[in-house]
Amino acid sequence: MVENERDLDGEPASRLGEESSGQNLGRRAFARQLAMCLGLFAVAPLVSSCSSSSPDEEPVEEVVPEVMTKKFKVTVSNWKFEPANIHVNKGDMVELHITNTEGVHIFYLPDYDIRVDLASKGRTVVKFEADKIGTFAFNCDFICGPGHNAMKGTLVVSEV
Ligand SMILES: [Cu+2]
């Protein structure tokens, strides 16, 4: 493997001037790095620090923020969510343990593409990553009775 690479690199050096062969070697080395990176991606998609192995750049230390899982018990009944306001930080893993105690409801948080049927009594766990900052409304998406329009709440995702 290593010997083959030497042969390939040696070939143009014997034909071309020093400067151009140097560039050529650089390009070849870069191409090899790129190929290795692509190979890594194929094998291990979680490895994401390709740039650190580039010959032109200093290795960059990545700061990986600590992932917090925040669990909330949410009770749904006629006609409210309790609590109606949920506050997390960006990057948190959020677990909503939703218990429907009364009626038929659908928990709907459109900005996070979450829509959960709460037709039957019992607990439903919704998990998602709070990857967008802002105030996002959620509501009941099933016309469940006279108090249906009051079934609203907000998810607030703050910058850390
Ligand atoms: Cu409703």
Image (cartoon, rainbow, N blue to C red):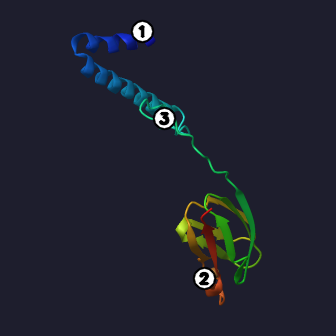
Q: Nearer the viewer, mark 2 or mark 3?
A: 3
Q: Is residue 137 visible?
A: yes
Camera-nearest residue between 35 and 147: 35
Camera-nearest residue between 105 and 113: 113
Callout 3: few (<14), some (14-19), or many (20+) C-alpha neighbours within 10 Å? Answer: few
Callout 1: few (<14), some (14-19), or many (20+) C-alpha neighbours within 10 Å? Answer: few
Name the quarter where the N terminus is drawn: top left
Amino acid type, residue under disc 1 in the picture: Glu
Location of residue 27 (image quadrant): top left
Camera-nearest residue between 119 and 31: 31
Amino acid type, residue under disc 2 in the picture: Ile
Callout 2: few (<14), some (14-19), or many (20+) C-alpha neighbours within 10 Å? Answer: few
Q: Is residue 1 visible?
A: no
Location of residue 74 (image quadrant): bottom right
Residue 126 at what x, y percent from top left? 67, 62
Q: What is the count of numbered marks?
A: 3
The image's mark for residue 58 is: 3
Q: Are marks 2 and 1 in contact (CB under 8 Å)?
A: no
Q: Which residue is mark 1?
A: 3
How far is the residue under mark 2 from the one under mark 3?
58 Å
Residue 105 at what x, y percent from top left? 66, 76
Horizontal placement of 115 versus 3: left or right? right
How far is the residue under mark 2 from the one under mark 1?
72 Å
At horizontal 29% and vertical 24% (from top left) the residue drawn is 23
How far is the residue under mark 3 from the one under mark 1?
27 Å
Work out whether mark 2 precedes mark 1 in sequence or the reverse, and give the earlier one.
1
Determine whether the residue tagged by mark 3 lies in a helix, strand or loop.
Answer: loop
Q: Which residue is mark 2?
A: 143
Work out whether mark 3 precedes mark 1 in sequence or the reverse, and give the earlier one.
1
Work out whether mark 2 precedes mark 3 in sequence or the reverse, and give the earlier one.
3
